Every structure is written in C-alpha cells, then in structure tokens.
C-alpha cells in the first residue's frame, strides 16, 4: 500500500505518516517498506486513473508498504485508529496461535486413529489370508487321487 492511502486509512496527514516513518527508519527494513523511484512513480501514475490530482504532481515519491510494514506502521503512529489497528493485529496473532495449537492436537489425534485403524485392518487382512489359505488346502486335499483299494 502507498503512504497516502495508509494516511487516509489511519486518518492522519501523509506528511505526518512520512515523518513518523523517517523518525523510525530502523523499524522499516526493505522488506517492510521502500520508497518508489521517480520512474516507478511515473509508471504508477500512467497506469492508475484514480489517483488524486494533487499527488500526481508531487515532487516527493511515495513510500510503499508491505503487509508487515503496515503492521509496523500501526505501532509507530499515534492516532487512535492506528492504536486500534495494532490491538486488532495482536489479537489476530493470538487467535492464529490458538488455532495452530488446536491444529496440532487435532493432527496428533488423527495420527493416533490412523495407527489404531491400521492395526485393526492388518488383523482383518491376516484373518482373510488365513481363511483363503485354509480354503486352498481343502481344495488341494479334495482333488488328490486316493491311494489304495476302492
């Protein structure tokens, strides 16, 4: 997301957002945020029709944030909405951790059921093989020629 969209979302000025980012640059590595070059910004302007007119001719190029950068930005900004975003992000991570632990328990239970089922099917398979072998032996015995007097 670009800085002016995030500024609108957090209900602060773009200038204030950029200022907060510049004051905390160590929190925004390249995989969290980067600044568009002039050529990239011109390409964005030519491809996007719905950009505000005042931004198209701005001398400064915008910052682009990844999802991690947006999360970090919510912890840097001081607006009430940014604080709510940060709280919601932390709650989402807690829920994800809970789901992962539930998933782990479910996976262990499924593995246990698979083991029990495999043991039962192995027993059934052995019983069927035993019965088939017994039938083969009986057939072989009935087909033998009798020795001795008739």
Image (cartoon, grey):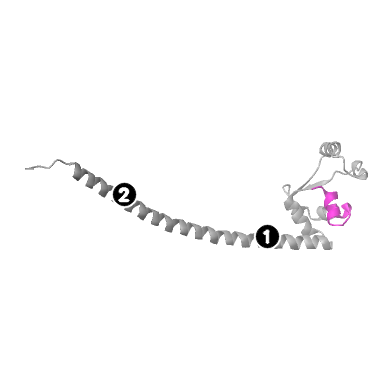
Tag 1: Cα neighbours inside 10 Å, few (<14), some, or many (≥20)? few
Q: Nearer the viewer, residue 78 or 47?
A: 47
**Quarter of the rendering containing residue 56:** top right
Q: Is residue 7 above or below residue 45?
A: below
Q: Nearer the viewer, residue 61 or 91?
A: 91
Q: Residue furthest front?
A: 150
Q: Is residue 12 on the magenta stretch?
A: yes
Q: Is residue 112 rendered to the left or right of residue 138?
A: right
- Quarter of the image where the C terminus is located: top left
Residue 9 appears at what percent x and percent y? 84, 54
Q: Which residue is mark 1?
A: 93
Q: Which residue is mark 2?
A: 129
- Who's the residue at 93% across and 45% down the image? 54
- Label 2 secondary element: helix
- Who's the residue at 65% across and 59% down the image? 96
Residue 88 appears at what percent x and percent y? 74, 61
Tag 2: Cα neighbours inside 10 Å, few (<14), some, or many (≥20)? few
Give the mark nearer the N terminus: 2 vs 1.
1
**Quarter of the rendering containing residue 53:** top right
Disc 2 + disc 1, Cβ < 8 Å = no
- Who's the residue at 60% across and 59% down the image? 100
What label does residue 120 carry, if any? Answer: none
**Quarter of the rendering containing residue 42:** top right
Q: Is residue 71 rendered to the left or right of residue 146?
A: right
- Label 1 secondary element: helix
Magenta stretch bounds: 1-19
The total number of labels drawn is 2
Q: Nearer the viewer, residue 29 or 111?
A: 111
Residue 83 appears at what percent x and percent y? 79, 62
Q: Is residue 73 on the magenta stretch?
A: no
Q: Is residue 76 above or below residue 58?
A: below
Q: CA distance from mark 2 to mark 1?
A: 53 Å
């Amino acid at each position: 997301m670009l800085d002016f969209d995030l500024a609108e979302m957090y209900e602060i000025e773009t200038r204030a957002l950029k200022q907060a980012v510049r004051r905390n640059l160590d929190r925004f590595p390249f995989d969290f945020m980067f600044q568009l070059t002039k050529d990239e910004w011109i390409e964005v302007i030519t491809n996007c029709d719905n950009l505000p007119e005042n931004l198209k001719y701005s001398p400064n190029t915008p910052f682009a944030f990844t999802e991690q950068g947006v999360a970090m930005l919510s912890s840097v900004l001081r607006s009430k909405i940014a604080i709510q975003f940060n709280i919601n992000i932390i709650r989402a991570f807690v829920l994800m951790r809970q789901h992962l632990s539930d998933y782990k328990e479910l996976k262990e239970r499924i593995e246990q059921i698979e083991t029990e089922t495999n043991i039962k099917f192995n027993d059934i398979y052995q019983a069927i093989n035993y019965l088939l072998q017994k039938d083969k032996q009986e057939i072989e015995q009935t087909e033998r020629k009798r020795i001795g007097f008739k």
